[in-house]
Image: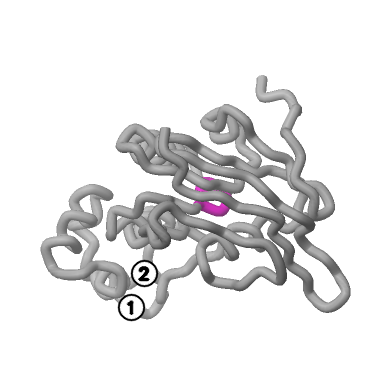
């Protein structure tokens, strides 16, 4: 499998507090790289660096070919609540054809005119995922993608995760859900800014 991302000695600090210390890992096509750990240990910060939303204070992130399409689903709702589903998708889709393809794929065609603020939590998450995947990214970055959702919505999003990997994409994810951690052959535990192999029970 071809390596799509190589992270080496990544560091991030806020003032004198070092949130991430010498983080190193690689991710290849068709894989899932999963991070877990207690709240506040730096997991979301790590994903924001990989997504390009924030900059590290040391180390490097190298993508295959120099540039590679990334889709980012943050933990917090990234949608514009006062806008319609269509308007939110328009921000991420290159043209109408791509927008309609995303709407069909995520069963959003019937609610395109609906204001996002009127949607359930599960549907907001589906719209956010559609936005993240609209450009068919090679690397999909997801921060606790199914937290707080019911069984039906959890499974529909997990189906998208598995299909993304089957297509040769790389999934980089933060999760506390055993079923999602199992998608990774070698999950990681982030503990006080240090990355370790995860050896917890997934039964």
Question: Within 10 angstroms of label 2, few (less than 14), some, or many (20 or more) residues?
Answer: many
Point out residue 60 in the picture as x, y percentages from the top left corner: 62, 61
Q: Tell whether position 200 is magenta.
A: no
Give left or right: position of 4 versus 127: right
Residue 198 position in % (x across, y down): 72, 33
Estimate the x, y position of residue 85 in percent, counting from the top left: 29, 68
At horizontal 51% and vertical 37% (from top left) the residue drawn is 32
Q: Is residue 63 left or right of residue 60?
A: left
Dot label at residue 22: none
Mark 1 secondary-structure assignment: loop
Q: Is residue 202 above or below residue 86?
A: above
Q: Is residue 145 magenta?
A: yes
Question: Where, by quadrant of the figure, is residue 42 drawn?
Answer: bottom right
In the rendered image, which residue does mark 2 sit on? 116
C-beta proximity under 8 Å, tags 1 and 2: yes
> Upstream in the sequence, badge 1 or badge 2?
1
Foreground residue among 203 and 169: 169
Image quarter where the N terminus lies is top left
Q: Which residues are magenta?
A: 142-146
Please state the total of marks drawn on the protein image.
Answer: 2
Determine if residue 49 is in view: yes
As drawn, is 88 to the left or to the right of 148?
left
Q: Classify 10 Å Cα crowding around label 1: few (below 14), some (14-19), many (20 and above).
A: some
Residue indicated by mark 1: 83
């Amino acid at each position: 499998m071809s390596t799509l991302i190589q992270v080496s000695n990544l560091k991030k600090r806020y003032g004198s507090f070092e949130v991430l210390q010498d983080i190193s890992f690689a991710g290849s096509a068709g894989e899932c790289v999963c991070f877990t750990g207690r709240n506040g240990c730096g997991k979301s910060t790590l994903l924001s660096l990989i997504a390009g939303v924030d900059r590290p204070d040391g180390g490097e992130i190298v993508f295959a070919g120099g540039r590679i399409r990334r889709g980012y689903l943050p933990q917090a709702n990234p949608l514009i609540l006062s806008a319609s589903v269509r308007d939110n998708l328009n921000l991420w889709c290159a043209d109408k054809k791509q927008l309609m393809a995303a709407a069909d794929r995520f069963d959003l065609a019937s609610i395109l005119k609906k204001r996002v603020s009127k949607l359930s939590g599960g549907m907001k998450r589906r719209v956010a995922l559609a936005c993240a995947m609209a450009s068919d990214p090679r690397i999909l970055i997801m921060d606790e993608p199914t937290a707080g959702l019911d069984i039906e919505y959890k499974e529909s999003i997990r189906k998208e995760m598995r299909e993304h990997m089957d297509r040769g994409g790389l999934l980089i994810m933060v999760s506390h859900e055993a079923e999602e951690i199992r998608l990774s052959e070698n999950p990681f535990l982030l503990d006080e800014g240090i990355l370790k192999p995860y050896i917890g029970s997934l039964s």
